Image (cartoon, rainbow, N blue to C red):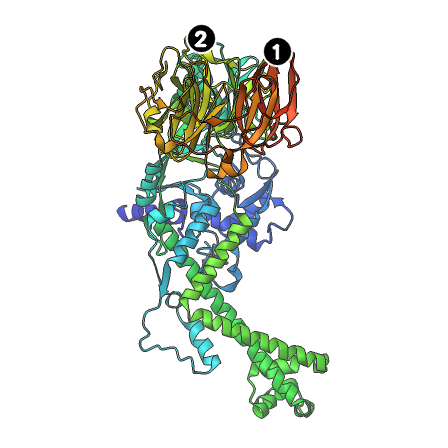
C-alpha cells in the first residue's frame, strides 16, 4: 500500500500537476500543442472543431477524461487567463464572469502564432521522444521552447504534498532579463581528456565526432555573474492579463529571491464626478477574479450595511472593454467608499507565489527567478546543439552526394560508358563504386540523376550548391566547437522574440505597501493643468484642453472666464504634485493637485476660499508647483510691496498645516506681492510703481527661517512701492525681455541686459523716462517668444489686445519712454495687464 501510494504521488507530481521548467508546460498542455502541430492545425491554417482536437489528444497521447482535456485547451485560449494565448479560439471560450465555454462540438481552435516558438525545430531531433500510452506513437518529453514559457504564462497546480503557483510575466521584460543574463555569462567546456577533437582531421571525421558527442558536453557549463537584484531591475514584477495594480515591491523581490512570496493586486478604479454625483469606475480587475461574483459580493456588502454610500451598481462592460460603474450617494465620501471596497471585496486580492517546477532532471524543486532563467538557458543550449548536429549531418550528407555528382560530371564520358555497358542498375552501381571510388549513396545519386542535369547551367548550379553547403558546414562546425557562440545565437533569437511579440506591461507597479497607502495612491498620476483667476476661482483641467508645456511652466494667461474675470495663473503639473499658495498676508497653504476639483474648461471653478482657510481680505498672490523630491535643494524667494526680499529652503515648507503657516513676517503696512521657486543662483529684479528697478544676485540674500521678515531689496520713497518682481538667469537674459506698461497706456520691451547687477538695498536705476505724459508704471512682466498677446485693461473698462511683436511693442533701451499702446481719456488709467500664450487655443 505504501509503495502504491508513493507511485501514485510521483505520477501526479511528474505527469499531471507540475510544469517542466524548460518549456513551462504540464503534460496535458504539451500533448494538446503537439497533437495540433502534428495534425497541421497551425496559426496559418483554418480553424478545426475543438471536439476533433480533443479526440486526437485522447486517442493518441492522453488517455483521460475528455472534459479535463477540453478545459485545458479552453484555458490556453482565454485572454483573461493567459498573458499570451497559446491557442487561437473561435466561439464561446468562457468569460471573466465565470460563464462556461460552449460545448466542444461548437467551438473551433488552432494554434496561435506564438505557439510556433514553442514547437519550432521539433522536426530536427532536438528533444527526446518517448512512447505514448500504448507504445504505438512517439511524443516529445519536452518541447524545444524558444519562449521562456514558464515565466510568461505562469502555472498553477496542486500535486501530492506540494503545489505550484507561478504568476505570468511580461515578455519584453523577461527577454531583456535573459539578454542581461547572457551578457554576463560564460559557457565553458571541460578540458578534453582521451576524447580530443582534432581540427586538422578530415571534415567527415570531424562531423562524425561532433555529431556523436553528447549535446550537454558541447553546450558547456553555463555560469553567470548576474544577480537576482540585477534581474529585478528589469523584471518589475508579474504582469497579469487582466491588468490592475500590484503593490509592495519588496515582497515581490522576496518572492523572486526565495521562490515564495505574495503579490497584492488591486483593481484599476477611478473616482469621477458626473451630473448625478460621484461615481467609482472600475476598468480592470485583479487576476482570476470572477466579475459576476464580485458584483454580487458588493451588493451583499451594501445590503448588510457593511459599506454605506453606494446608490447603484451597474455592469457596463461591452466589446470595447470592462467597466463596472458604482454610483455614490450625494453625502458619500468617494475615497472612503473605495477603501472599504478594497478591504471587503475582491477589488483587492493577493497572489501567493510558490515557484515549484520540475527541473531538467525531472525532480520537483522550489526555484528563484534566476534558477528558472538559467534552467531555461541550459535547455536552449542543448536544443541549439542538437539542432546544429542535425543540420550538420544533413549538410554533410548533401555535400557527400554533391561530391559524387561532381566526380560524375568531371568524368562524364567514362560514367556514361560504365552505365551503358552494365546489364542492370545494380551492376552499374557496383562498377561506379569500384571505378571512381564512390560510396553507395553517391553511386545511387548518379544513377538517379536526370539527363537535364548534364547541361552547363545545371553543372554550375551543383558547383554553387556545393560551395554553399561547404560554407554552411564550416559555420555549423565553428558553432559546435564554440559554446560562447551558442549563447550568441540564443541572444539573437531572444531579440527576435521581443521584436515579434514584445508589448507594454498591463499591470502597474506601485512600490509602497498597502498598509502605507495614502489617499494619493488611489489617484492615477497623470498630467493636469491648474488655473487661478483674479477673482479667486481655481480649477483643475484635463491637459488636452491646452497644448503641452513643461511642469510648472508659464505663469499668467489671459483667458476670459466671464466679463469681469481673467485667468491670472496657469500651471502644468502632475496630479501627485504639491501646490504652494502664497497669500498677500504672508501665509502659505499646501494642496495636492488632485485635491482641486476637476472641471470643464468653460466652468467657473471652485472658489479658493472653499479650499483654504483664508481670512478677510486675504487673496492668493502666487501659485507654485513643487516636486517634493527633485526640488529639495532649491529655495522659495518672496518679495513684499515695501521692497523686502527673503529666501527660504523648500524643505522648511514640507509640514504645512491645513489652516496654513507663516511664510514671511510682514509689517502692518506691508503685504506679499510675489513668490517664486529659485535655484539659489538666479538674479532678482524688483520694479517699482515710480519707475525704479534694482537687480541683484540671489546669493546676496541669506537663506532664513519661515517666520522672518527678510531684508531690504530696494530703498523706496515713501510714496513708492514694488509693482513687479522677476527672477532671471544667464540663459533667460539672452532670450527674454521686461515688458513695461505705464498708467497712461505707453509701453516697451527692454532686454534684461539693460539692467545692471547692483548691490542689494540700493535705489536702483530707471526703467524708463517717467513723466506726466507716460504716467507711473502700471505693470512689469517678463516675456519671451512663447507669449502671443498682451491684454491691457483700464479703470473705466476699456480693453485692448496687442500682439507681442516688434511692430506693436518695440524693443527699446531702458532710458526711453516707450510708445503709445493705448490712447486714454484724461480721467482713465491702466489697472491690469495680462499675457496670453501661443499654446492657448482660445
The quadrant of the image that shows the C terminus is: top right
Query: Which of labels 1 and 2 is toward the front?
Result: 1
Q: CA distance from mark 1 to mark 2?
A: 26 Å
Residue 236, position in %: x, y?
41, 41
**Quadrant assignment for the N terminus:** top left
Residue at point 58%, 44% (across, down): 88
In this view, the residue in front, 841 or 265, is 841
Answer whether residue 251 is visible to the viewer in this image: yes
Q: Nearer the viewer, residue 303 or 733?
A: 733
Residue in the foreground of this view, choosing between 96 and 503: 503
Pointer 2 residue:
617
Q: Residues within 10 Å of mark 1 (few under 14, many from 20)?
A: some
Badge 2: residue crowd in 10 Å (few <14, some 14–19, many ≥20) = few
Residue 81 visible (yes or no): no
Q: Which mark is residue 828?
A: 1
Q: How many marks?
A: 2
Label 1 residue SS: loop
Which residue is nearer to you in this view: 789 or 110? 789
Image position of 25 with respect to 313: above or below: below
Q: Position of residue 4 (x, y in %)?
A: 31, 47
Amino acid at each position: 500500500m505504501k509503495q502504491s501510494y508513493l507511485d501514485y504521488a510521483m505520477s501526479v507530481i511528474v505527469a499531471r500537476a507540475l510544469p517542466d521548467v524548460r518549456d513551462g508546460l504540464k503534460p496535458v498542455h504539451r500533448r494538446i500543442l503537439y497533437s495540433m502541430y502534428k495534425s497541421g492545425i497551425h496559426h496559418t491554417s483554418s480553424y478545426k472543431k475543438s471536439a476533433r482536437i480533443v479526440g486526437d489528444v485522447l486517442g493518441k497521447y492522453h488517455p483521460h477524461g475528455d472534459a479535463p482535456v477540453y478545459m485545458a485547451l479552453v484555458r490556453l485560449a482565454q485572454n483573461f487567463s493567459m498573458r499570451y494565448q497559446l491557442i487561437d479560439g473561435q466561439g464561446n471560450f468562457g468569460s471573466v464572469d465565470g460563464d462556461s465555454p460552449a460545448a466542444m462540438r461548437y467551438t473551433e481552435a488552432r494554434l496561435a502564432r506564438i505557439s510556433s516558438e514553442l514547437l519550432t525545430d521539433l522536426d530536427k531531433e532536438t528533444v527526446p521522444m518517448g512512447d505514448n500510452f500504448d507504445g504505438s506513437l512517439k511524443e516529445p518529453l519536452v518541447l524545444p521552447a524558444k519562449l521562456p514559457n514558464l515565466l510568461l504564462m505562469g502555472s498553477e497546480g496542486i500535486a501530492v504534498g506540494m503545489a505550484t503557483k507561478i504568476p505570468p510575466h511580461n515578455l519584453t521584460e523577461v527577454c531583456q532579463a535573459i539578454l542581461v543574463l547572457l551578457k554576463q555569462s560564460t559557457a565553458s567546456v571541460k578540458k578534453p581528456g582521451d576524447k580530443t577533437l582534432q581540427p586538422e582531421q578530415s571534415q567527415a571525421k570531424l562531423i562524425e565526432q561532433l555529431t556523436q558527442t553528447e549535446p550537454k558536453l558541447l553546450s558547456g557549463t553555463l555560469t553567470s555573474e548576474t544577480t537576482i537584484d540585477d534581474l529585478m531591475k528589469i523584471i518589475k514584477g508579474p504582469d497579469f492579463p487582466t491588468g490592475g495594480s500590484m503593490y509592495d515591491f519588496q515582497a515581490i523581490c522576496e518572492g523572486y529571491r526565495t521562490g515564495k512570496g505574495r503579490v497584492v493586486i488591486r483593481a484599476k478604479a477611478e473616482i469621477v464626478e458626473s451630473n448625478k454625483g460621484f461615481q467609482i469606475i472600475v476598468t480592470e480587475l485583479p487576476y482570476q477574479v470572477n466579475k459576476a461574483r464580485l458584483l454580487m459580493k458588493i451588493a451583499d456588502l451594501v445590503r448588510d450595511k457593511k459599506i454605506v454610500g453606494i446608490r447603484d451598481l451597474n455592469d457596463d462592460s461591452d466589446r470595447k472593454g470592462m467597466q463596472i460603474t458604482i454610483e455614490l450617494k450625494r453625502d458619500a465620501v468617494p475615497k472612503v467608499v473605495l477603501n472599504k471596497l478594497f478591504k471587503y471585496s475582491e477589488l483587492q486580492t493577493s497572489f501567493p507565489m510558490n515557484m515549484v517546477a520540475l527541473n531538467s532532471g525531472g525532480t520537483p524543486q522550489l526555484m528563484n527567478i534566476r534558477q528558472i532563467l538559467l534552467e531555461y538557458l541550459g535547455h536552449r543550449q542543448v536544443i541549439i546543439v542538437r539542432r546544429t548536429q542535425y543540420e550538420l549531418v544533413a549538410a554533410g550528407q548533401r555535400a557527400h552526394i554533391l561530391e559524387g555528382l561532381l566526380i560524375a560530371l568531371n568524368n562524364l564520358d567514362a560514367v556514361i560508358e560504365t552505365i551503358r555497358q552494365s546489364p542492370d542498375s545494380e551492376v552499374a552501381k557496383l562498377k561506379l563504386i569500384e571505378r571512381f571510388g564512390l560510396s553507395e549513396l553517391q553511386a545511387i545519386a548518379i544513377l538517379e540523376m536526370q539527363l537535364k542535369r548534364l547541361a552547363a547551367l545545371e553543372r554550375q548550379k551543383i558547383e554553387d550548391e556545393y560551395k554553399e553547403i561547404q560554407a554552411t558546414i564550416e559555420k555549423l562546425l565553428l558553432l559546435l566547437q564554440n559554446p560562447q557562440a551558442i549563447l550568441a545565437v540564443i541572444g539573437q533569437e531572444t531579440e527576435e522574440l521581443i521584436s515579434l511579440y514584445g508589448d507594454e506591461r498591463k499591470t502597474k507597479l506601485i512600490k509602497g505597501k498597502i498598509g502605507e497607502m495614502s489617499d494619493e495612491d488611489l489617484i492615477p498620476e497623470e498630467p493636469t493643468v491648474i488655473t487661478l483667476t483674479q477673482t479667486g476661482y481655481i480649477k483643475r483641467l484635463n491637459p488636452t484642453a491646452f497644448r503641452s508645456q513643461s511642469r510648472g511652466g508659464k505663469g499668467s494667461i489671459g483667458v476670459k472666464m466671464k466679463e469681469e474675470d481673467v485667468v491670472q495663473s496657469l500651471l502644468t503639473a502632475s496630479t501627485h504634485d504639491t501646490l504652494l499658495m502664497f497669500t498677500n498676508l504672508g501665509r502659505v497653504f499646501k494642496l495636492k493637485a488632485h485635491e482641486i476639483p476637476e472641471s470643464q474648461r468653460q466652468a467657473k471653478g471652485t472658489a479658493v476660499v472653499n479650499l483654504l482657510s483664508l481670512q478677510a481680505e486675504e487673496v492668493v498672490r502666487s501659485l507654485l508647483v513643487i516636486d517634493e523630491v527633485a526640488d529639495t535643494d532649491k529655495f522659495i524667494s518672496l518679495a513684499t510691496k515695501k521692497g523686502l526680499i527673503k529666501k527660504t529652503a523648500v524643505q522648511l515648507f514640507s509640514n504645512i498645516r491645513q489652516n496654513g503657516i507663516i511664510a514671511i513676517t510682514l509689517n502692518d503696512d506691508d503685504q506679499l506681492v510675489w513668490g517664486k521657486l529659485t535655484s539659489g543662483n538666479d538674479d532678482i529684479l524688483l520694479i517699482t510703481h515710480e519707475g525704479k528697478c534694482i537687480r541683484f544676485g540671489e546669493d546676496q540674500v541669506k537663506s532664513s527661517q519661515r517666520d522672518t521678515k527678510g531684508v531690504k531689496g530696494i530703498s523706496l520713497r515713501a510714496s513708492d512701492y514694488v509693482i513687479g518682481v522677476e527672477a532671471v538667469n544667464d540663459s533667460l537674459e539672452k532670450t527674454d525681455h521686461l515688458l513695461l506698461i505705464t498708467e497712461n497706456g505707453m509701453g516697451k520691451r527692454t532686454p534684461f541686459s539693460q539692467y545692471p547687477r547692483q548691490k542689494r538695498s540700493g535705489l536702483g536705476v530707471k526703467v524708463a523716462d517717467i513723466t506726466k505724459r507716460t504716467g507711473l508704471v502700471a505693470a512689469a512682466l517678463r516675456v519671451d517668444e512663447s507669449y502671443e498677446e498682451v491684454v491691457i485693461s483700464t479703470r473705466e473698462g476699456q480693453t485692448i489686445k496687442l500682439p507681442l511683436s516688434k511692430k506693436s511693442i518695440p524693443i527699446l533701451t531702458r532710458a526711453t519712454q516707450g510708445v503709445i499702446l493705448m490712447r486714454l481719456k484724461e480721467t482713465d488709467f491702466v489697472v491690469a495687464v495680462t499675457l496670453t500664450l501661443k499654446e492657448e487655443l482660445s
